[in-house]
Amino acid sequence: MADKKVLTVDNINPHIRDMEYAVRGRLAIRAEEIRDELAQGRKFPFNTVVSCNIGNPQQLNQKPITFFRQVASLCENPDLLTADKEPIVSQLYPKDAIDRARQILKDIGAGIGAYSHSQGVPALRKAVASFIAERDGHPADPNSIYLTQGASAGVQNILSILTENEKTGILIPIPQYPLYSATLTLLGATPVPYYLDEDSGWSLDVEEIRKTVHEARSKGTDVRALVIINPGNPTGQCLDAQNMQDILTFCHTERLVLLADEVYQTNIYEPEQRPFVSFKKALKEHPERDAIELVSFHSISKGMIGECGRRGGYFECCNLDSGVMAQLYKMASVSLCPNVSGQIMTALMVTPPKQGEPSYALYQNEMTGLYESLRRRSKKLEAVFNDMEGVTCQPAMGSMYLFPRIRLPPKAIAKAAELKVLPDAFYADQMLEATGVCVVPGSGFAQKEGTWHFRSTFLPPEELFDDFCGNLRKFHADFMATYN
Ligand code: DCS
């Protein structure tokens, strides 16, 4: 008995044991192993592993936005801002980057090595509020904004405060980004899945959700919030303004808090046909603008910025009860504060260089270049998928992913059963071993029963994109030839 550990997998928090997160699951772990084996000289049919399982742009060589890093680096090393260094530093950094860093350090006061206000530095929250006001044409209150370590931390906090007990039900889309299902498992709350309709471009039918709510309530689930990911992950759809009004009315009549995950709000690829509208703006245009409870999330990880590793973002609360707001503040204060570097990047995201400032042209160039390239890559990969035998793929109106549906031959399904893996996981395993491309099987996001998908980012660098597409085409043709 002496060598038996006190803590074992059998006696840990069972919610953690049950939690699943496929974006960094078994396949991603195997991809890392292959990466190590390649480095040690082992031969594979490819030279590099391409991580298309995760929306992590800088891992796939996307360059950071110059101005943001200039300001961030000066904030990290305020020694560079002393008068004696000015002659050197002014040659290395544009004046607006220097001025901005000075201003941010002044706003922060104690410097970035000190804990800040638990909600985030007030001046940086004010910058976020101004951004929201300008984006939506309606004011925002800095005291209703929390700066967070990525949107993930905000979502976890809000789901946590929403969970009264195991009967608490939260509506999550299927397919969904597994942060939601995983967090609800951890909290012991009840996920209430509602389905997006693939054939109509992953659209959301309010009447279908209403049926789901009534059914769950009739079985004793206390459904109290609706999660909407817009633009969608993994599905890439973008909601239209009328649909959003209907969703708000639905939340009001069914008494639901609306959680709007808007981390892909600048990854919009059909801006004329389907521009991004924030739920905050939609709320302000709704007759029940002062009643409907809304929390919306944003992040520095996505867009053209892709500063995933810095962990920054925010959420804004509208119409929440003041007592709940006080409890939310208490929760944030237990973690002391979000990391200050992430707060700085969040503030930079919302206040980029303006026209007339020295860094404006370069900033615009970098952002537009990245945006156009992402858009081209999304269209190219979509066409490649739609050209494959048995594959259909809805366009990405937004986000960083495509989620093609694959119709697998019976022989492939039988082989997967023999190996005791799901058919889409088998397909993704084979793809990784043949091409080095790591994707996520659709089962990691949940999908309509009997359908199989996978999710791939379109983030591989443009100069390698044709090779990447060619490898996928060849793999799929070989796979179908083997199992047909
Ligand atoms: N919400 C959605 C819809 C996301 O896709 C992600 C990250 C997050 C929240 C959390 O992001 P941050 O915590 O970094 O702000 N997307 C994951 C994904 O599917 N691939 O990469 C990470």
Image (cartoon, grey):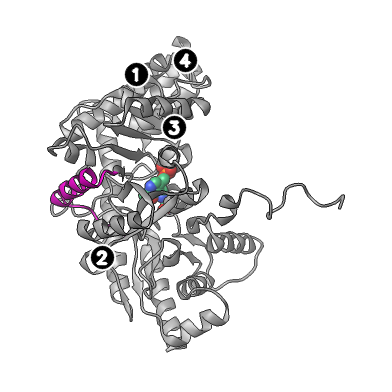
Q: CA distance from mark 4 to mark 2?
A: 59 Å
Q: Give the crowd class for mark 1: few <14, some 14-19, many >=20 residues within 10 Å.
A: few
Vertical order, 90 against 173 (above or below) = above
Q: Is residue 399 visible?
A: yes
Q: Which residue is mark 4?
A: 85
Locate residue 332, reporting x and y percent.
46, 28
Locate residue 113, reporting x and y percent.
53, 21
Q: Magenta stretch: give its range.
A: 235-256
**Residue 416 vs residue 20, the one in the foreground:** 20
Labels 1 and 4: the sequence-earlier one: 4
Q: CA distance from mark 1 to mark 4?
A: 14 Å
Q: Is residue 70 visible?
A: no
Q: CA distance from mark 3 to mark 2?
A: 36 Å
User: Closer to the camera: disc 1 or disc 4?
Assistant: 1
The answer to if 226 sits in the magenta stretch is no
User: Closer to the camera: disc 3 or disc 4?
Assistant: 3
Labels 3 and 4: the sequence-earlier one: 4
Q: Which residue is mark 3?
A: 342
Q: Secondary structure at mark 3?
A: helix
User: Closer to the camera: disc 1 or disc 3?
Assistant: 3
Q: Give the crowd class for mark 2: few <14, some 14-19, many >=20 residues within 10 Å.
A: some
